[in-house]
Image (spheres, rainbow, N blue to C red):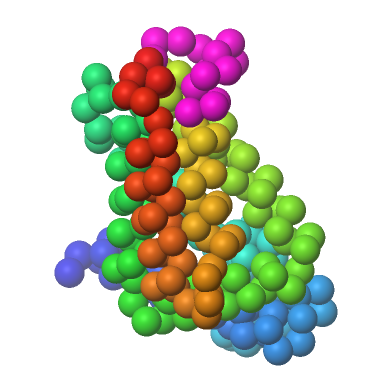
Amino acid sequence: MTAVGLRERKKEKTRLAILDAALELFLEQGYESTTVEQIAGAVDVSPRTFFRYFTSKDHLVLWFHDQSEEILLETMAARPPDEPPFTALMHALRAMLADIEDATPQEHERFLKLRRILDENPRLVGQSVARGTETERRLAEVVAARRGVRADEDQLSHLIVAFAMSTMRVGFECPRSDGSLPEITGRMAESIELAERSLRPGWDA
């Protein structure tokens, strides 16, 4: 493995160590009671090192938005340029879902811990919604470009994105029983299929 590859692996290991320590502290003593200094100390790094990986405590809890947005934008960029925007978005959502389903047991555990933390801290839910709005704005720009219009002048581009992303929210927020990750991803997959069946072809032209 190259020196660059080794460096990246070490950085990722440190990032995950900080994240895991933070999640444990948030659940043990509460989000508001936990400081950056405590998180850094738990993994034997300085607060300065902490801020190389995360911009704030809130960023720790919302890190999954960064990962999901990256998958969505990369998938959209790889789809055929003449594919209907909503269809392209559905493929992007399925790619994001596949990434969740292919996650390791440790990643599954992080996901469920994050959900618990969000459930226990309404302020963070608001932060999560705001971060999701940023992603929707970026996706609307991509959709508008596909349609040959400007995002700031075209409501339909924003509506296409809003409808697509709402399928994920329905799956995530409406568990049927135990709220486990397989149940959540199953609900998300069902929501995607229902959304596709509910729209007439060409509505997003």
Is residue 11 among what the camera can see? no
From the viewer's perspective, is residue 51 above or below residue 93? below
- Which stretch appears magenta? 146-160
- Residue 149 magenta: yes
Q: Is residue 127 left or right of residue 100?
A: right
> Does residue 164 sit above or below 167 in this rendering?
above
Left or right? Give the position of 204 relative to 138.
left
Q: Residue at x 57, y 62 (%)?
A: 174
Residue 154 in the image: above or below residue 171? above
- Where residue 143 sits in the image (x, y, percent)? 42, 24
Quadrant of res 35: bottom right
| The C terminus - image quarter | top left
Most prominent secondary structure in the magenta stretch? helix
Q: Can you give x and y, in whole percent of width and height, for residue 105 in the image?
A: 37, 81
On the image, the x and y values in percent for residue 168 come to: 49, 51
Residue that appears at 42% across and 26% down: 142
> Residue at point 37% right, 56% down?
189
Between 192 and 71, which is closer to the camera in this rendering?
192
What is the residue that sits farthest to the right in this orientation?
Answer: 33
